[in-house]
Image (cartoon, helix red, strand yellow):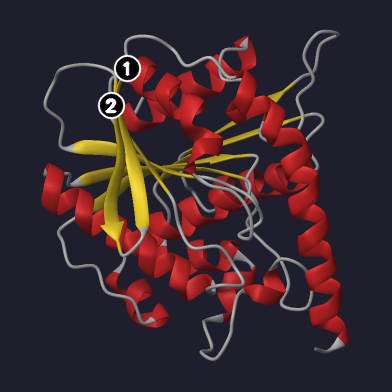
């Protein structure tokens, strides 16, 4: 193992330990909203599963595709369950909350193949044709590139991916999302293994330039370590003519707008505002 790999592995182990120290008590204390029907542990690919949260009794041909964060190396759909249930209740649109294989047990292409498989499964089993991707942190990155791949056969060809259904990504929603990294630092060092991918994987602004982007919501906060990046990406999308709405939540004495605050606290006023923006984005408002 070279020095770059050793540094990345040290960073990965530290990151996972830090996340567990925060997420374990948070998940134990979560209170799920009433009025949401939950379909749990539906299989979509080998040992991978998704949940569906349904906030009304209507028939839908659209769904939120919720992708959890965790720097591509940590987490599960349970991290975003409470947020997803609140989103389904507020929007009236079902939410599919998916698991995916974590790096380094797979690479970026592997994760994207799994997300495309989830899209195919939702289309085949539930008649879904329209998707609204949502993700936090690294999940925001995956939500953006997944929306681009769903909409662009050219992009899928560049990545060597297939999508065996007729689907469209109408919107993308990034919660404290990342959009760039490097190939020599954590987590980007895990992106490629044997197969070379387009260089744009290290800066998704180039993917937007080449393939376009659906209407977008970007949410961040004044304590979010990715706030500056999110502001820069908002400015870039605006300059590119993408329909984009931006929310930079301000901390109060009682509530601190740290990284992925709407995921941790969807019932806060700031979390509800983020959900309202995502709901409006899905509706084209």
**Residue 198 versus residue 252 in the image, above or below:** below
Give residue 47's position: percent from left, percent from top.
36, 60
Q: Is residue 79 left or right of residue 119?
A: right
Q: As rendered, which of 156 and 85 lies closer to the eye?
A: 85
Give residue 69's position: percent from left, percent from top.
59, 47
Quarter of the image for the C terminus: give it. top left
Q: Are marks 1 and 2 in contact (CB under 8 Å)?
A: no
Label 2: which secondary element: loop
**Dot label at residue 36:** 1
**Residue at point 72%, 42% (across, down):** 20
Quarter of the image for the N terminus: give it. bottom right
Give the residue pinned by disc 2. 93
Q: As rendered, which of 26 and 214 lies closer to the eye?
A: 26
Label 1: which secondary element: loop
**How far is mark 1 from mark 2, CA to CA?**
11 Å
**Residue 46 versus residue 178 in the image, above or below:** below
Q: Residues within 10 Å of mark 2 (few under 14, many from 20)?
A: many
Reading the chain from its start, which is encountered first: label 1 or label 2?
1
The answer to which image quadrant residue 8 occupies is: bottom right
């Amino acid at each position: 193992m070279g020095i770059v790999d050793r540094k990345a592995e040290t960073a990965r182990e530290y990151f996972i330990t830090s996340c567990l120290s925060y997420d374990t008590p948070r998940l134990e204390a979560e209170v799920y909203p009433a009025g949401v029907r939950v379909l749990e542990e539906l299989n979509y690919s080998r040992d991978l599963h998704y949940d569906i949260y349904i906030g009304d009794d209507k028939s839908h041909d659209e769904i939120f595709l919720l992708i959890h964060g965790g720097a591509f190396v940590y987490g599960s759909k349970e991290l975003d369950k409470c947020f997803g249930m609140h989103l389904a209740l507020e929007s009236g649109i079902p939410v599919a909350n998916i698991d995916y294989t974590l790096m380094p047990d797979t690479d970026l292409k592997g994760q994207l193949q799994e997300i495309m498989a989830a899209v195919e499964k939702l289309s085949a089993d539930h008649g879904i044709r329209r998707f609204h991707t949502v993700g936090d942190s690294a999940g925001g990155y995956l939500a953006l590139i997944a929306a681009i791949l769903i909409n662009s056969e050219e992009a899928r060809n560049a990545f060597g991916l297939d999508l065996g259904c007729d689907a469209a990504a109408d919107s993308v929603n990034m919660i404290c999302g990342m959009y760039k990294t490097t190939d020599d630092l954590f987590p980007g060092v895990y992106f490629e293994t044997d197969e070379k991918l387009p260089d744009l994987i290290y800066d998704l602004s180039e993917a937007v330039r080449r393939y376009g982007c659906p209407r977008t919501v970007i949410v961040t906060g004044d304590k979010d370590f990715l706030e500056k990046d999110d502001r820069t990406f908002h400015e870039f999308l605006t300059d590119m003519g993408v329909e984009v709405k931006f929310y930079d939540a301000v901390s109060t004495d009682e509530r601190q707008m740290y990284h992925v605050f709407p995921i941790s606290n969807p019932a806060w006023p700031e979390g509800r505002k983020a959900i309202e923006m995502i709901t409006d984005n899905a509706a084209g408002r």
